[in-house]
Image (spheres, coloured by chain):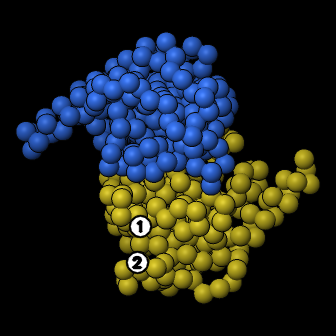
Chain colours: A yellow, B blue
């Protein structure tokens, strides 16, 4: 919580946070807030290519009745549609929470260039916490990763959601 | 190739092939053949609940311009829509090739009951070959797995596709 954004070990030295990272993470957080209001686990995502937003999405698993409707996966689908190219090599994906296995796999499949996430998911995170799929030598693509951008805000909204869930059950 | 379908180590003893497995794998293979004709990597999938087909899909990455449009992921989305339930706990998913990381993660997210696949993907397979995500104690769901159903046919169509691709490049 609140610690300095870190550069993942094993990453190229060029993987640094940019001045815009916080700006785009704030937009991803807005998506997470909208998911919160819709009673969805509050995770939001934004995809950017050369300072142009090409996709925004939020978790819609319940409302879409779709177990794959995580923010990241939907943003990737939208981004590929918008650019007319399923390879998102030049793109940065911002997401409020460390991606799960499915979403990290989708990022590899999309040849995503760069991933910036907010808080860690110690239980199921597939980039750093439980699995390290963004830079696995067994896979055919590796992704530059920056974590911890607006970490506290991204974690707080999840905590608030699960507190609300427990009190309304 | 052609060896007896195996029950994965560490799986419950109840994970056995059924008499219908070959039937449904043949349908998945028909989907793969359609993908072949569409110049897509030929992988097909079928989802069944209590001997009722609830989804069929084939790889459409190129034609849909969608890096997530693998047969399994699309079948999961369709199956959840059809049943009105994102939890596919009672379902069996048939797919001609061992799933990738993204698709294995989608199966865990969908709480898939049972997975039957044809041939292995030694490079990127995420159920047995490279990763073992269907029964990982770190994840919140494990999937019963049977492999090797119509293995030769499922592998052959992939081989034919990549031979065709090389000769037309």
Q: Is residue B167 left or right of residue B66?
A: left
Q: Is residue A78 visible?
A: no
Q: Which residue is mark 1?
A: A135
Q: Which residue: 47% across, 68% down?
A: A115
Q: Position of residue B54 (x, y in %)?
A: 55, 21
Q: Is residue B123 left or right of residue B105?
A: left
In the displayed structure, B12 sits above or below A70; it is: above
In the displayed structure, B20 sits above or below A87; it is: above
Q: Which mark is first along the chain, 2 or 1? A: 2
Chain to which mark 1 belongs: A
Q: Which mark is residue A11?
A: 2
B93 and A41: which one is in front?
A: B93
A108 and B139: which one is in front?
A: B139
B78 and A137: which one is in front?
A: A137
Q: Which residue: 52% across, 16% down?
A: B18
Q: Which residue: 75% across, 66% down?
A: A157
**In which image quadrant can residue A92 be found?**
bottom left
Q: Is residue A1 left or right of residue B148?
A: right
Chain to which mark 2 belongs: A
In the displayed structure, B140 sits above or below B150; it is: below
Q: Residues within 10 Å of mark 2 (few under 14, many from 20)?
A: some
**In which image quadrant can residue B52 be found?**
top right
Q: Position of residue B66 (x, y in %)?
A: 39, 45
Using the numbered discs, state the Cα–Cα distance from disc 1 to disc 2 in whole angstroms.
8 Å
For the residues bearing labels 1 and 2, Cβ distance under 8 angstroms: yes
Q: Which image quadrant: the N terminus of chain A?
A: bottom right
Q: Position of residue B7 (x, y in %)?
A: 49, 31
Q: Which mark is residue B129?
A: none
């Amino acid at each position: 919580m609140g610690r300095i954004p870190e550069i993942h070990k094993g990453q190229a030295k060029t993987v640094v946070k940019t001045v815009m990272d916080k700006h785009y993470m704030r937009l991803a957080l807005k998506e997470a807030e909208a998911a919160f209001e819709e009673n969805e686990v509050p995770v939001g995502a934004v995809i950017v290519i050369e300072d142009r937003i090409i996709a925004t999405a939020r978790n819609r698993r319940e409302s879409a009745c779709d177990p794959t409707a995580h923010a990241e996966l939907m943003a990737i689908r939208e981004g590929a549609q918008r650019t007319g190219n399923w390879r998102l090599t030049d793109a940065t994906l911002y997401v409020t929470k460390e991606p799960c296995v499915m979403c990290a796999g989708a990022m590899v499949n999309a040849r995503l260039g760069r991933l910036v996430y907010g808080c860690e998911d110690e239980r199921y995170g597939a980039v750093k916490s439980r699995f390290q799929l963004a830079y696995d030598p067994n896979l055919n693509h590796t992704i530059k990763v920056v974590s911890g951008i607006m970490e506290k805000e991204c974690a707080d909204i999840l905590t608030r959601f699960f507190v609300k869930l427990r009190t309304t059950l």
